[in-house]
Image: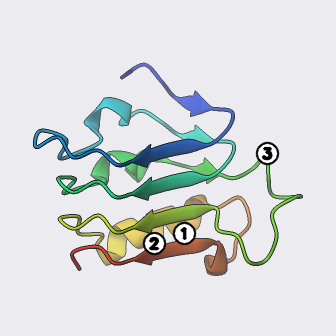
Amino acid sequence: MEKLTSIGGNLHIESNDHAKFVNLDGIKNLTKIGGQLIIKFNSSLKTIDALKNLTSVGASIKDTITADENIITIFTNENLVVDENMETALSNALAIPDSKYLYISNNKN
């Protein structure tokens, strides 16, 4: 997966309870996600620093997404710390430059 640089649709990373699933290093070269990015219910995940190379998330859905939907959701990952730098990087990658489409909640921090 390390050669993966782009995903045309959604990327869901959820419900991974394996103790060795602590990072997303396998997708560190990913720069574009056409649809939504959802990371939730990953109890061992500690870092999403591998997503720092993202430059665009949601470009293929920006004309159809409603105001009550999120483009990026990072929710209930009990060991995950999302620092301010990562939150800023994710916000900057949004295809619609509006932080209301970024939802980060119920993680370790």
Helix, strand or loop at label 2? It is helix
In 3D space, how far apart are the residues under numbered discs 3 and 1 (Cα atoms)? 17 Å
Is label 3 or label 1 in front? 3
Total marks placed: 3
Looking at the image, the residue that sits furthest to the right is 63
Left/right placement of residue 20 relative to residue 24 reads: left
Is label 3 or label 2 in front? 3
The residue under label 3 is: 60
Quarter of the picture containing the N terminus is top left
Residue 36 drawn above or below residue 77: above
Looking at the image, the residue that sits furthest to the left is 19
Q: Residue at x 30, y 69 (%)?
A: 82
Q: Residue at x 68, y 33 (%)?
A: 8
Residue 13 drawn above or below residue 76: above
Pointer 2 and pointer 1: residues touching (CB < 8 Å)? Answer: yes
Q: Position of residue 32 (x, y in %)?
A: 59, 40
**What amino acid type is highlighted by mark number 2?**
Thr
Helix, strand or loop at label 1? It is helix
Helix, strand or loop at label 3? It is loop
Question: What is the crowding at mark 1: few (fewer than 14 residues within 10 Å), some, or many (at least 20)?
Answer: many
The scheme the figure's colours follow is rainbow
Q: Residue at x 81, y 58 (%)?
A: 62
Left/right placement of residue 77 relative to residue 104 reads: left
The residue under label 2 is: 88
The residue under label 1 is: 91
In 3D space, how far apart are the residues under numbered discs 3 and 2 (Cα atoms)? 21 Å
Q: Residue at x 31, y 53 (%)?
A: 48
**What amino acid type is highlighted by mark number 3?**
Ser
Left/right placement of residue 102 relative to residue 19 reads: right
Q: Earlier in the sequence, mark 3 or mark 1?
A: 3
Q: Of residues 68 and 88, which is closer to you in this image?
A: 68
Residue 11 drawn above or below residue 74: above
